[in-house]
Amino acid sequence: VPPPPPRSGPAAKTYALWVLPTFYDAYLFEGCSKGIIAQAFSGAAVVFVSIANRLIAEYPEYENEVGHLYLGGYYTVAPWPLSSLPKAERHYALHATKAPKSLRASYYRGVIAFRQGKWREASEFFGATQGLSCAASHTESDFCGFMREEAARGLAEARSYLNEAPS
């Protein structure tokens, strides 16, 4: 059993910085196991957005405001009427301003551009991932290979759409 959390001071902030993202990940995976539609109707979305906003407001130094990535993901996959690709795009862009060398930010921005049919932008973002390392954050390395492979696939598809488009 872990010791109780400190109530104040730097130790309390360090503890919260470790616990909040871990709780968020657990909440996210638990929600995925129940299905996104069921989660939307259960009110889980309110908690999800609240935790992401708290991470941004209280712990901006953690993973370069990773809460923006969480919110971008939320607005990407949430069911209607909660989904909003423009909001997702804005949150991914905000994260990218904090971590311009983030492979994850470039990949997610490529996904959003691709989903909106913005083939040139998708090509640029997916192409940028090929020159980036996964050192922008310690959690990015967990799925760096996947993002790099998917970005290469997205780049090829976006380019094929560009080649098919009338001039």
Image (cartoon, rainbow, N blue to C red):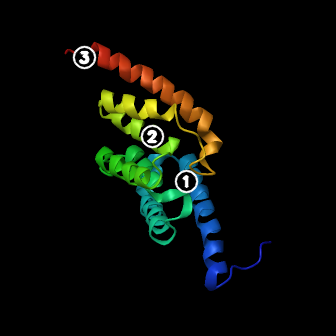
Q: How far apart are labels 3 and 2 at the CA level?
A: 24 Å
Which residue, given by chain and number where applicable, does mark 2 sit on? Answer: 106
- Left-right relation of 53 to 115: right
- Left-right relation of 57 to 116: right
Rendered image: mark on residue 44 = none
Which amino acid lies under the numbered mark 2 shown in the image of this protein? Ser
**Closer to the camera in the image, 151 or 74:** 151
Q: Nearer the viewer, mark 1 or mark 3?
A: 3
At a point 63% along the width and 61% down the height, the residue shown is 22
Rendered image: mark on residue 28 = 1
Dot 3 falls on a residue whose secondary structure is: loop
Dot 1 falls on a residue whose secondary structure is: helix
Specify few, some or many for label 2: CA neighbours under 10 Å numbering under 14, 14-19, or 20 or more: many
- Left-right relation of 48 to 89: right
Specify few, some or many for label 3: CA neighbours under 10 Å numbering under 14, 14-19, or 20 or more: few
**Closer to the camera in the image, 150 or 27:** 150
Which amino acid lies under the numbered mark 1 shown in the image of this protein? Leu
Image spot of residue 144 (x, y percent) = 60, 38
At a point 59% along the width and 56% down the height, the residue shown is 25
Q: Is residue 85 above or below residue 68?
A: above
Which residue, given by chain and number where applicable, does mark 3 sit on? Answer: 165
Image spot of residue 2 (x, y percent) = 77, 72
Of pointers 3 and 2, the one earlier in the residue sequence: 2
**Closer to the camera in the image, 130 or 1:** 130
